[in-house]
Amino acid sequence: MEDQLQRYAQNQRNQYDTTSRTLEEAQAQIAPNYLEVRRIAGRYARFMLQQYAIRRGGTTELSAEDLSRLRILDFGCGVGRVMEAFTELGVGQIDGCDISEAMLTHARASPSLQKSEFFLTNGQDAGAAPEGQYDIAYAFLCLHHIPMRETRIAILRSLAKVLAPDGMIFIELKIFPGATPAKIPPQHAHWSENMVATYTNSASDVWVTPDALGMVYGDFRLFFFDIALIEFDLGTNHFEFNPSSIYRLGFNELFVVGSRKPTLKKLAIS
Ligand SMILES: C[S@@+](CC[C@H](N)C(=O)[O-])C[C@H]1O[C@@H](n2cnc3c(N)ncnc32)[C@H](O)[C@@H]1O
């Protein structure tokens, strides 16, 4: 298994490093419509801050002072798209880690991320990100591109380590409500698989299908408490099969949220 994990990480690093030499190339790796996804990054950043605020004390807003004290880690930060959005909302410290030195070079050059620290990962960890420090760790447009279950589990383990005792994790995935295991296209994986894919970034993704939700929960429950699976319906047709689309069936966003220690019971009974 260790050999498989390393081969898969090497394949990922090669692809991102060789396709992201200029900033424009790197942005195209993140999304063909980069400017549009950059524009809406703030909505998702706000969503994460609201969820964090609720678990901290039942309100949905953090004060400017609370925001300025927050320390957040972006896993698979790419060129720093979501990190920039957190900075614009007033978050005090936002750091990033990534498997690709090319991506990190672009993120380091972002004018709004000059206070950030960046860490190169081995594909299964958070690099030299300090342990026990972060209030929030999140990954966006990243883990759904990892069809190797053991890699995802190793990443969750390392994110649990970097979180402060009352920290929270947010992992964005894609759920395919109309898919069954038999409908997952070749080169893409069911949640249960350990696929050593040669290519990544939509060429080989993990498809979260409804039958796999128990496994998703179980993997997060290894390291986190108060797991929430929150679906953002994108209004697509989940059953129409389009063979010329990379995703072929409609999908929704799926955020898996967890706390490093139980918090919701205390809130519910206080
Ligand atoms: C599609 S880009 C998304 C970048 C950023 N999260 C965003 O939403 O704009 C995926 C990023 O995840 C990084 N990545 C992929 N697999 C990784 C892994 N195993 N460990 C760390 N970073 C990884 C890639 O290098 C790339 O920068």
Image (cartoon, grey):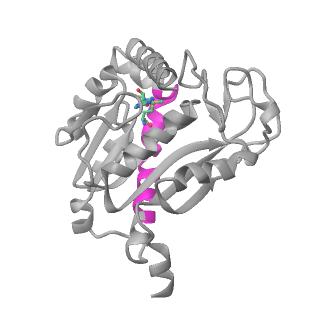
Figure quadrant, ligand 1: top left
Q: Residue at x 57, y 21 (%)?
A: 196
Q: Residue at x 32, y 46 (%)?
A: 73
Residue toward you, 1 or 124: 1
Residue 71 image position (x, y, % from top left): 26, 54
Quadrant position of residue 156: top left
Prevailing secondary structure class for the magenta stretch in the rendered image: helix
Residue toward you, 37 or 256: 256
Residue toward you, 181 or 145: 181
Q: Quadrant of the C terminus?
A: bottom left
Total labels: the figure holds 0
- Image vertical order of residue 254 relative to residue 103, above or below: below
Which residue range is magenta in the image?
A: 30-51
Q: Which residue lies furthest to the top in this view?
A: 18
- Image vertical order of residue 170 relative to residue 35, above or below: below
Q: Residue at x 73, y 38 (%)?
A: 250
Quadrant position of residue 163: bottom left
Q: Which residue lies furthest to the left in this view?
A: 115
- Residue 234 appears left or right of 102: right
Question: Does 41 lie within the magenta span?
Answer: yes
- Residue 102 appears left or right of 212: left
For residue 90, say whether it is visible.
yes
- Image vertical order of residue 134 relative to residue 9, above or below: below
Q: Which residue is drawn at 56% across and 30% down?
A: 148
Residue 207 image position (x, y, % from top left): 67, 36
Question: Does 170 lie within the magenta span?
Answer: no
Residue 76 image position (x, y, % from top left): 40, 35
For residue 233, say whether it is visible.
no
- Residue 223 appears left or right of 94: right
